[in-house]
Image: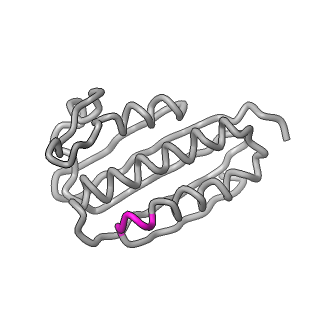
Amino acid sequence: MYDNSMKIEFISKSQNESFARVSVAAFVSQLDPTLDELTDVKTAVSEAVTNSIIHGYENKEGIVKIEASIKGRELILIVEDNGIGIENIDMAMQPLYTSKPELERSGMGFTVMETFMDSLQVESEKNKGTRLIMKKVFNSLS
């Protein structure tokens, strides 16, 4: 059982990326994170949501779902879409790989998420969507 949890969903518009980032940051604030910890989470959320919008839905309208849960000092964060899915997860997770080179994407989204969170799990099925499960333990003291 979790100590606390929240769920939000929103239309896959780039304007909603900042809403997602700030919403998760507000939820995480109950753990009294350091500024660095909070920035890590906000950056990971930003990358995950941007991936859903650009790659999952290919800038078409869909729904992005975020679920955040706290258990002790650990944040469990799930970002999910019902987009086109990822054909080859291993390839997609390689630094500098992008499926959209014409958009001048850096191909660093998953690398950034892995760097700033303690763990990243990617589940995806072609034409059904993608689910990212990220975890981070907060070392700051309340």
| Viewer-side residue, 44 vs 138 | 44
Tell me the quarter of the image containing the C terminus.
top right
Q: Residue at x 16, y 58 (%)?
A: 127
Q: Horizontal and vertical percent for residue 49?
A: 40, 55
Q: Is residue 103 above or below residue 128?
A: above
Q: Horizontal and vertical percent for residue 48?
A: 40, 49
Q: Is residue 76 above or below residue 84?
A: above
Indicate the colouring scheme. Answer: one colour
Magenta span dominant secondary structure: loop
Q: Residue at x 20, y 31 (%)?
A: 91
Magenta-drawn segment:
12-16
Q: Residue at x 35, y 67 (%)?
A: 12
Residue 41, picture quadrant? top right
Residue 40, picture quadrant? top right
Q: Horizontal and vertical percent for residue 26?
A: 68, 58
| Viewer-side residue, 75 vs 116 | 116
| Viewer-side residue, 84 vs 37 | 37
Q: Is residue 35 above or below residue 15?
A: above
Q: Is residue 137 above or below residue 17?
A: above
Tell me, yes or no, whether the highlighted magenta stretch contains residue 103: no
Q: Horizontal and vertical percent for residue 97?
A: 22, 32
Query: Which residue ends up furthest to the right in the rendered image?
Result: 142
| Relative to 12, 76 lies left or right | right
